[in-house]
Image (spheres, rainbow, N blue to C red):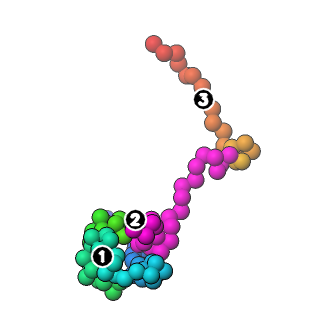
């Protein structure tokens, strides 16, 4: 039997984000190419809508602009995972209970 679960497609949109970053920083694609050691044609292709083939190159661009890969690829930051301290009010209110109990002595 085939799996009939819906497939979620994530749309990579480097074109828009990269255009905005280049414009806001006031640099040229040639300057970005030299600074990141990525061929200018590759960057022009990304700006035209081509999807990148190298994660290493994406990482170089994200580091150059000091943004995350999530922001570069999708135009928004990933939602951070909640830490235990963010649940402190619920834990103290009795929503969660953590019990540590010795169940058998060490042998």
Labels 3 and 2: the sequence-earlier one: 2
Residue in the foreground of this view, choosing between 54 and 4: 54
The verdict on residue 81 being magenta is yes
Residue 82 located left or right of residue 22: right
Q: Nearer the viewer, mark 3 or mark 1?
A: 1
Label 3 close to label 1 by CB (< 8 Å): no
At label 3, counting other C-alpha atoms closer than 10 Å, the crowd grade (few under 14, some 14-19, many 20 or more) is: few
Magenta residues, start to end: 64-88
**Residue 62 location, x and y as percent?**
40, 68
Q: Which residue is mark 3?
A: 100
Marks 3/2: CA distance?
A: 44 Å
Q: What secondary structure is marked by label 3?
A: loop
* Residue 72 occupies quadrant: bottom left
Q: Is residue 36 above or below residue 100?
A: below
Marks 2/1: CA distance?
A: 13 Å
Labels 2 and 1: the sequence-earlier one: 1
**Residue 5 location, x and y as percent?**
41, 68
Q: What secondary structure is marked by label 1?
A: helix
Picture quarter with the C terminus: top left
Q: Residue at x 34, y 81 (%)?
A: 29
Q: Residue at x 52, y 15 (%)?
A: 105
Q: Residue at x 54, y 58 (%)?
A: 80
Q: Is residue 82 visible?
A: yes
Q: Which residue is mark 2?
A: 63
Marks 3/1: CA distance?
A: 56 Å
Residue at the right extreme of this rendering = 93
Residue in the foreground of this view, choosing between 72 and 61: 61
Residue 93 located left or right of residue 79: right
Q: Is residue 6 above or below residue 90?
A: below
**Residue 53 location, x and y as percent?**
27, 72
Residue 33 bears which disc, if any?
1
């Amino acid at each position: 039997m085939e799996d009939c679960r819906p497939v979620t497609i994530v749309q990579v949109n480097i074109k828009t984000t990269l255009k905005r970053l280049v414009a806001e920083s006031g640099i040229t694609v040639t300057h970005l190419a030299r600074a990141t050691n990525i061929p200018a044609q590759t960057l022009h292709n990304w700006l035209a809508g081509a999807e990148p083939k190298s994660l290493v190159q994406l990482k170089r661009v994200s580091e150059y602009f000091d943004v995350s890969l999530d922001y570069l690829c999708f135009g928004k930051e990933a939602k951070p995972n909640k830490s235990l301290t963010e649940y402190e009010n619920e834990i103290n209110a009795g929503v969660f209970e953590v019990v540590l109990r010795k169940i058998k002595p060490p042998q």
